[in-house]
């Protein structure tokens, strides 16, 4: 076993590394870091970290979720969700605390509630972002965000929006 710990004492026991593609359902204790491509579902009382180059097309149920890459799917958190400036979430978020940095692309419904449900929120179909659904995000801004992420090595990003 590894003896790597995050400063808050979380045990880093699972990593989907950059250049790795993983499909399946994960139930784990500790911390999962995604720097590659993950498809499926994740359940943990610990933390999920989606790195800047990470892409996750999945349902997440965790204590804390930090998104620096792309998550396409619903997130349900018992503690908090943090979306960093490089992050993109296309799906619904259910959490007692939500922290979103400037520059984030977020398309979905956010429910901020101290009552964490025992079950995952009802699955919502994640569809491509139509121009009229983007609200204040113009087509040019949306395309610019897409191009920026492609330039950062996420060449398949646009294929996720079909």
Image (tube, rainbow, N blue to C red):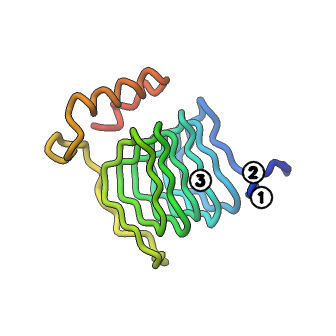
SS class, disc 2: loop
In the image, 39 versus 117, the foreground residue is 117
Q: Height in image: 71 above or below 53? A: below
Q: Residues within 10 Å of mark 2 (few under 14, many from 20)?
A: few
Residue 152: image location, x then y, percent: 48, 24
SS class, disc 3: strand
Of badges 1 and 3, the one in the foreground is: 1
Residue 23: image location, x then y, percent: 53, 46
In the image, 6 versus 23, the foreground residue is 6
Q: Which residue is mark 2?
A: 6
C-alpha distance separating marks 1 and 3: 14 Å
Query: Does residue 93 appear left or right of residue 15 in this picture?
Result: left
Q: Residues within 10 Å of mark 1 (few under 14, many from 20)?
A: few
SS class, disc 1: loop
Confirm or deny contact between disc 1 and disc 3 (CB under 8 A). Answer: no
Residue at 85 percent across and 51 percent down: it is 1
Q: Height in image: 68 above or below 110? A: above
Give the total of numbered labels: 3
Residue at 77 percent across and 58 percent down: it is 9
Q: Which residue is mark 1?
A: 9
Which of the two labelled residues, at mark 1 and mark 3, occupies the earlier sequence position? 1
Q: Residues within 10 Å of mark 3 (few under 14, many from 20)?
A: many
Looking at the rendered image, the quarter that the C terminus falls into is top left
Q: Height in image: 62 above or below 144? A: below
Residue at 54 percent across and 55 percent down: it is 65
Q: Which residue is mark 3?
A: 48
Residue 2: image location, x then y, percent: 84, 48
Which of the two labelled residues, at mark 3 and mark 2, occupies the earlier sequence position? 2
In the image, 76 versus 120, the foreground residue is 76
């Amino acid at each position: 076993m590894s003896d790597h710990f995050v400063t808050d004492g979380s045990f880093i026991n699972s990593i989907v590394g950059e250049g790795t593609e993983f499909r399946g359902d994960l139930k784990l204790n500790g911390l999962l870091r995604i720097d590659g491509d993950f498809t499926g579902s994740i359940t943990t009382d610990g933390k999920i970290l989606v790195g800047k180059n990470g892409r996750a097309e999945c349902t997440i149920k965790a204590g804390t979720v930090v998104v620096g890459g792309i998550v396409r799917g619903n997130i349900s958190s018992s503690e908090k969700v943090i979306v960093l400036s490089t992050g993109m979430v296309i799906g619904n978020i259910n959490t007692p605390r939500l922290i979103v940095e400037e520059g984030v692309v977020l398309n979905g419904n956010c429910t901020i509630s101290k009552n964490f449900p025992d079950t995952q929120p009802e699955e919502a179909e994640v569809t491509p972002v139509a121009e009229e659904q983007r609200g204040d995000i113009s087509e040019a801004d949306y395309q610019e965000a897409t191009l920026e992420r492609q330039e950062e090595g996420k060449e398949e990003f646009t294929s996720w929006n079909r």
